[in-house]
Amino acid sequence: MERDIMRNTSDPRVADLVRAGRIRVGLFLPLYTKDPVTGEPRGALGVGALAHEIARAIAERLGIEVELIGYPTPPAVVECLKADACDVGFMGIEPSRAAEVDFSPPVVQFKFTCLTTAGSSIRVIADADRPEIRIAAVRDHASTLALSRSQTGIRRDRRRCVRSVVH
């Protein structure tokens, strides 16, 4: 019965999804991995799995399929949404993106921190807010954008993806 209510809604966005028979979910690394056999994106552990499960639950209620679409970065997912090449994306609510896409209320909340080497003098985030400290961060990721708003004295080494930051 709940599926019929969802399918018969007057919301044109829901009607578009039902008519298309699928919900296209834009994910960025590291929210997905690629299936080693097919190369198709699939939800990764953590937030990626959560995003996939939320999309799957919506699709199930509507009686439609889920299509995961993988992108390298959050801005690429924003472009996907703007181009109507995907229906939903999961990313941090970031003021700089609000002019380009709409956000739902928050689904999850994360606290970010820094990884340091053993023996580092950095014990809290404020310890890293100095010009001589260089922080490697993922370019355009919500955590990096939040860091940019809160920390002023640090040098940032922005990289395209998580893998290039940690390697």
Image (cartoon, rainbow, N blue to C red):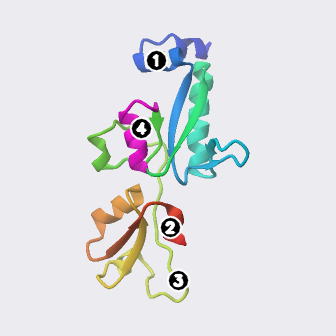
User: The disc labelled 3 sits on which kind of residue?
Assistant: Thr
Mark number, residue 80: 4
Callout 2 crowding tier (Cα within 10 Å): few <14, some 14–19, many ≥20: few
Callout 4 crowding tier (Cα within 10 Å): few <14, some 14–19, many ≥20: many
At numbered mark 2, what does the secondary structure look like: helix, strand or loop? helix
Q: Is the magenta stretch mostly helix, strand or loop?
A: helix
In the rendered image, which residue does mark 1 sit on? 16
Residue at (59, 44) in percent of width and height = 50
In the rendered image, which residue does mark 2 sit on? 164
Residue at (54, 64) in percent of width and height = 163
Report the front residue among 95 and 123: 95
Q: Which of marks 3 and 4 is nearer the N terminus?
A: 4
User: The disc labelled 1 sits on which kind of residue?
Assistant: Asp
What is the CA distance from the residue labelled 3 to the residue labelled 4? Answer: 37 Å
In the rendered image, which residue does mark 3 sit on? 117
Q: Is residue 59 magenta?
A: no
What is the CA distance from the residue labelled 1 to the residue labelled 3? Answer: 50 Å
